[in-house]
Image (cartoon, rainbow, N blue to C red):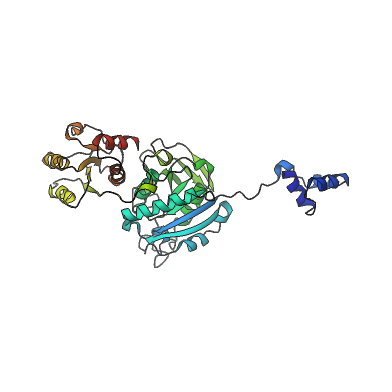
Amino acid sequence: MQCLAFASRIHPQETNVRSLIQLLMRGSMAALVASNVACAQVPAANTKPNIVIVATGGTIAGAGATSANSATYQAAKVPVDKLIAGIPELNNVANVRGEQAFQIASESFTNEKLLQLGKRVSALVKDPGVDGVVITHGTDTLEETSFFLNLVVHTDKPIVVVGSMRPGTAMSADGMLNLYNAVVLAGAKSARGKGVLVAMNDDILTGRDAAKRTNIKTNAFASGWGALGMVVEGQAYWFRAPVKRHTMKSEFDIDTLTSLPEVVIVYGSGNMTPELYDAAVKSGAKAIINAGTGNGSVPNYLVDTLKRVRAGGVHVVRSSRIADGFVIRNSEQPDDQYDWVVAHDLNPQKAKILAALALTKSNSTAELQRMFWEY
């Protein structure tokens, strides 16, 4: 078939086998040789991946008063069609279309919006005509959304979450390249089966580990365990792969979720007060993430408060305010004795996401702890 396509390039009216034979018999071999193209080298039909960009707002859709404004601007101003039109190079790597899911700054994301976005992404990846999905997102809660999707969308198709640290109007804007890299990644066959990914500042991060480390620089996102790889000039390069459960292997399914239980984070510091935990319980929290100091530490004057919280039916999850490392079970506090859970290496905001999903499956401390080990 490739040879037929080649022959049709030489003589557009002669595209079947008989015509090709006649062409050769008429002494047209010289034309074939002169073309200097072998049948095996005939370009295949257009096989660019089909990528849907789901826009939610954020800085990547922001605009500043002048090009000098890289940190002062209004988020969620530019619609998805203009974002796509501003990067004509996207047409070289994929067939792209956009959807505007929300137009908000990401600090305004709620559980309801997480569920709505997750269900839409799940529907898109079920479409055989969609090869991958890119989600443009504000960076403030990008790490929570990417982890949530990593846990609840059952697909091996690439889902890539992307944002920017500077608005498109800034002279040093990073959104254009970030979005281009995200589309490249979403269309890469090598990205299949790796879970939800984050494309920022050339890095490929797993949605599980990615965390915002600074609010000014373009290298804001990182993982304590390192990047999975990089996107350079339209090519994805890989150096490691995720090992925790995600997407296809997850026991959580967005298509069955209608709501999420309330989970509250209490941030640890010196001179804490019991009233913070009591207020969380009063608000209806089903679990409290204790963002403790160091190894998820709980001050001695709060131990009785947290024991009382757990005795009242609210789960206590020991996390840490430290960016890297992990909380060791039964270190600092006897978690087994107090029936507490440890968040392992998940930061407080990611622990909140997993705790909420875990509570849709079980109220058992042992089951919750299993999930924190596995995800």
59 relative to 336, above or below: below
| Residue 323 visible to an observer of this rendering | no
Quadrant holding the C terminus: top left
Tell which residue pokes out farthest to the bottom in this image: 65
Tell me which corner region of the image, top left, top right, bottom left or bottom right, holds residue 172: bottom left
Nearest the camera: 182 or 52? 52
- Residue 194 locus on image (x, y percent): 45, 40
173 relative to 334, above or below: below
Quadrant holding the N terminus: top right
Tell me if 307 is positioned left or right of 346 in this view: left
14 relative to 243, above or below: below
- Residue 313 locus on image (x, y percent): 18, 42
Nearest the camera: 250 or 158? 250
Q: Residue at x 49, y 63 (%)?
A: 82
Tell me if 57 is positioned left or right of 15 in this view: left
| Residue 16 visible to an observer of this rendering | yes
Tell me if 39 is positioned left or right of 325 in this view: right
Q: Residue at x 11, y 41 (%)?
A: 301
Total count of labels: 0
Nearest the camera: 184 or 248? 248
- Residue 33 locus on image (x, y percent): 81, 44
- Residue 340 locus on image (x, y percent): 21, 37
301 relative to 13, above or below: above
Nearest the camera: 154 or 323? 154
